[in-house]
């Protein structure tokens, strides 16, 4: 019968850890007392990860061993001394959250033991948000980490993980861009250039007095220019007056 410290047979799920005593060894394996109403049996192939030629090379009668449940049948409990994987390949799915220990660092990423047949790999780009040059900037061997499964390839036995997928992304502050009248957006450089161009081409507004003063200056400059041209041609004012009177005398009069 089962003792109080052990769970009943019907409650023994696969991978349940038990402690038992070797009752008998055979060519095919060993019989183990695990405190249940039916015996436990360890096949020779389940004594060690390495190949075993003789059962007595691994266990002996009376020895206390730690075992794990493989399956429960009506007449026996099949056991193993090989610690089972925490995660079987069929149990690993994308988007799963897993915990594990960093066991190896490479230039391209970190390998994390999550209890599967092989460690999962966190690429350097999946270690943290932002640029990471080398994995040891973020993690070290022996670190306990939590990661998200990105992809699992059962055929190639590869597990891709991400640590940054479980961390909040830090948003960078970006000032709002100004819009022009048409609703388009200008870059700061273009907007500055547009302002300078407008300032260069913009004509100052004149008052009525300034306009009158400008016209007077223009007339004075015109008269000055005419006198200079006339002086250069060698015709004096007196000569011009004489010429005009002579012409007036010679012109025929009406009547």
Image: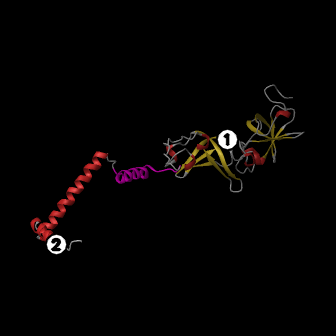
> What stretch of residues is rendered in magenta?
183-203
Tell me the residue at 67%/41% (across/down). Answer: 97
Q: Considering the numbered disc 1 on the image, is that residue within a helix, a strand or a loop?
A: strand
Residue 80 left/right relative to 201 = right
Tell me the residue at 16%/67% (across/down). Answer: 229
Residue ID for mark 2: 247
* Residue 84 x, y percent position in the rendering: 73, 43
User: Relative to the observer, which residue lies in front, 23 or 232?
Assistant: 232
Residue ID for mark 1: 97
Q: Residue 59 appears in which quarter of the rendering? A: top right
Residue at the extreme right: 74
In the picture, the quarter occupied by the N terminus is: top right
Q: Which secondary structure class fits the magenta region best?
A: helix
User: Which callout, 1 or 2, points at the residue further toward the start of the chain?
Assistant: 1
* Residue 28 x, y percent position in the rendering: 81, 47
Residue 163 seen anywhere in this rendered image of the structure: no
């Amino acid at each position: 019968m089962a003792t109080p410290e052990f769970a009943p047979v019907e409650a023994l799920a696969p991978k349940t850890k038990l402690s038992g005593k070797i009752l008998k060894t055979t060519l095919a394996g060993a019989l183990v007392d695990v405190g249940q109403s039916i015996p436990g049996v360890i096949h020779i192939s389940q004594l060690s990860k390495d190949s075993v030629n003789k059962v007595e090379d691994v266990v002996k009668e009376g020895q206390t061993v730690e075992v794990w449940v493989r399956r429960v049948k009506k007449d026996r409990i099949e056991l193993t001394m090989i610690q089972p994987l925490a995660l079987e390949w069929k149990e690993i799915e994308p988007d799963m959250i897993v915990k594990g220990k960093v066991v190896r660092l490479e230039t391209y990423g970190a390998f994390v033991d999550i209890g599967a047949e092989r460690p999962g790999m966190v690429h350097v780009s999946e270690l943290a948000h932002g640029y990471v040059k080398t994995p040891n900037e973020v993690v070290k061997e022996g670190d306990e980490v939590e990661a998200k499964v990105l992809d699992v390839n059962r055929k190639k036995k590869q597990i891709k993980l991400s640590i940054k997928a479980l961390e909040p992304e830090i948003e960078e502050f970006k000032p709002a861009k100004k819009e022009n009248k048409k609703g388009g957006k200008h870059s700061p450089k273009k907007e500055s250039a547009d302002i300078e161009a407008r300032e260069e081409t913009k004509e100052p507004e004149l008052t009525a007095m300034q306009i009158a003063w400008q016209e007077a200056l223009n007339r004075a400059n015109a008269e000055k220019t005419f006198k200079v041209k006339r002086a250069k041609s060698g015709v004096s004012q007196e000569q011009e007056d004489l010429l005009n009177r002579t012409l007036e005398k010679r012109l025929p009069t009406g009547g």
